[in-house]
Amino acid sequence: MDEPLLQVWALPGIPEIEPGADLVAVIADAAGDTLRDGDILVVTSKIVSKAEGRYRPAAERDAAVAEETVRIVAEDETGRIRIVESRLGIIAAAAGVDASNTPEGRILLLPLDPDASARALAAGLRERTGARVGVLLSDTMGRAWRDGQTDCAIGAGGVIVLEDLRGSVDSAGRALAVTVPCVADEVTAAADLVKRKATGLPVAVVRGRGDLVGALDLPGARSILRAAERDLFHTGAREAFAAGRASVTKAHDPPSAR
């Protein structure tokens, strides 16, 4: 059996992306003839947003965050820092609305449909390069109970996002009952080590996990999101306080008012 080997490198030569840009052509030109079957391209979602023209004036930031938000999960005492559930189902600060690496005076929203964008990129790159590649769109997120941020997959095209190991055994022969690694997040985090944040390298190639590359109709990154009925922490701070106040009020109501 061959020793496992993972190769990760960033694609140089990708220009500043303007609205309407043909990302398939841009990425294919940067990759040249280097792509092979089984390669996974990790694309910073911000350049997809730029190509989609998802800009808003910086003065409209609060309105943009509100429009992208479906639920406030937590906020600080000032209300300025908010962790919210976005219309995409993603739990993130400010619904992913961001001003970094954008022109002065403008902010950028997440792509309209990251999974659809990833599938379109994968389909276009397969046709243009002849290589059966997969595409992951990445965005930077924090993690509950841990400082710092890491890149996660918010869109996927032609890539297995969850590797279900339940029913297999570990090296000691013990059955694995709950192990389902989120390989899409692991791949995007690995790619961020070479893309980094301020180097102008928004696309990386990950080679060595061709077993994760498959049909374009594989479940997208939205399938990573945990359903509310299985989420032990689904209730946000406001909702939890409101429910607590309601239960206390009900407990003190006279029987005739119940």
Image: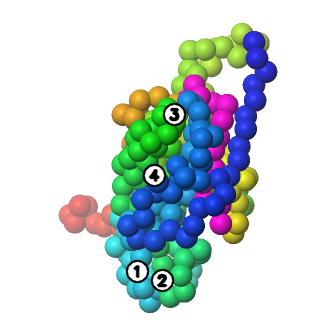
Marks 1,3: beta carbons within 8 A = no
**Residue 252 falls in which quadrant of the image?**
bottom left
Marks 2,4: beta carbons within 8 A = no
**Image spot of residue 102 (x, y percent):** 54, 77
Name above or below for residue 82 compared with residue 201.
below
In primary-sequence order, the first of circles 2 and 4 is 4
Give the alpha-carbon distance from disc 1 to disc 3, as whole Å.
36 Å
Give the residue type at disc 1.
Answer: Arg
Marks 3,2: beta carbons within 8 A = no
Helix, strand or loop for disc 2: strand
Residue under numbered circle 3: 131
Residue under numbered circle 4: 24
In the rendered structure, the answer to whether residue 238 lies left or right of residue 171 reads left
Give the alpha-carbon distance from disc 3 to disc 2, as whole Å.
36 Å
Is residue 130 or residue 110 the one in the foreground?
130
User: Which quadrant is the C terminus positioned in?
Assistant: bottom left
Is residue 36 or residue 120 the one in the foreground?
36
Q: Which residues are magenta?
A: 200-212
> Which residue lies at the image location 38% right of the left edge and 67% below the top edge?
20
Marks 2,1: beta carbons within 8 A = yes
In primary-sequence order, the first of circles 2 and 1 is 1
Name above or below for residue 145 compared with residue 122.
below
Residue under numbered circle 1: 56
In primary-sequence order, the first of circles 1 and 4 is 4
Name above or below for residue 58 compared with residue 42.
below
